[in-house]
Amino acid sequence: MSRLENLLGAWSLTVADRLDAVGREAGLSATDQAAVVTLLTYPDHAVSWLGDVLALTSSGATRLVDRLAGAGWVVRSPGDDTRQRRLRLTQAGVDIAERVMRSRETALSECLAPLDDRARGELERALERMIGASTGSLLPALRTCRLCDRSACRSGGRDCPLGHTRGEDAADA
């Protein structure tokens, strides 16, 4: 392993630990956080779709939705057939998802604080290339973006480096 790879691995764990701590402070697991943020961006999808995005088994997705509904963050509505239920955040769910996003922003800003503007620009370009090359299909892309702030990704006239997460492709997944 090269030093760069080792440093990247160490930094990845540092960032992941800080983001996990954000969720624990809010009383949310990493999966809970991903679920509410994903449903904020993609409402009215089936339980099975959410399970696929979060890499959960069918029973795991059902337990997650039961937990979120029990907390008052998600409501189920009829789906395309009697076996499916569509999911939508309640106002309390929207509030918790937005809280997760704000806390995530704070934690990530702290991680980037040591960098000056030039270094930040270089890192942004490198990350865009790395993320853009990380997957070529929709489901893994949605998994990568499960905690993304879509408006931040699309700021300045740019778009998600995982192009297949845009528009109808993601809505129909």
Image: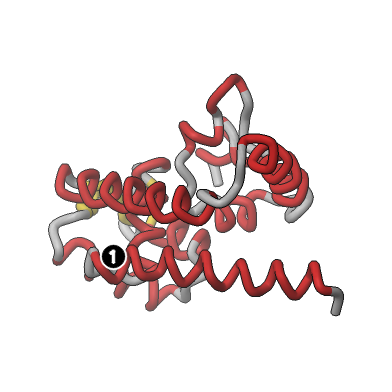
Q: Where is residue 70 in the image (x, y as percent from the top left)?
A: 14, 66
| Residue 2 in picture, x, y percent from top left | 86, 74
Q: Residue at x 15, y 63 (%)?
A: 71
At x 71%, y 70%, the residue is: 7
In this rendered view, identify the residue nearer to me: 158 or 70.
158
Q: Which colour scheme is used?
A: secondary structure
Image vertical order of residue 160 relative to residue 46, above or below: above
Residue type (three-letter) at the residue carrying disc 1: Val
| Residue 162 located left or right of residue 63 | right
Left or right? Give the position of 71 relative to 154: left
Residue 86 seen in the figure = no
Residue 116 rendering spot, x and y as whole percentages: 61, 41
Which residue is rendered at x = 38% and y = 50% of the image? 106
Left or right of 17 on screen, residue 145: right
In the image, farthest residue toward the top: 157
Q: Is residue 85 left or right of residue 144?
A: left
- In which quadrant of the rendered image does the N terminus lie? bottom right
Residue at 18 percent across and 46 percent down: it is 90
Q: Residue 171: x, y in percent? A: 51, 38
In the figure, residue 164 lies in which quadrant? top right
Q: Nearer the viewer, residue 144 or 153?
A: 153
Please indicate, yes or no, whether residue 154 appears anywhere in the rendered image.
Answer: yes
Q: Is residue 14 above or below residue 82?
A: below
Q: What element carries label 1?
A: helix
| Residue tagged 1 | 65
Give neighbour class at mark 1: few <14, some 14-19, many 20+ (Cα, 10 Å).
Answer: many
Count of numbered labels shown in the rendering: 1
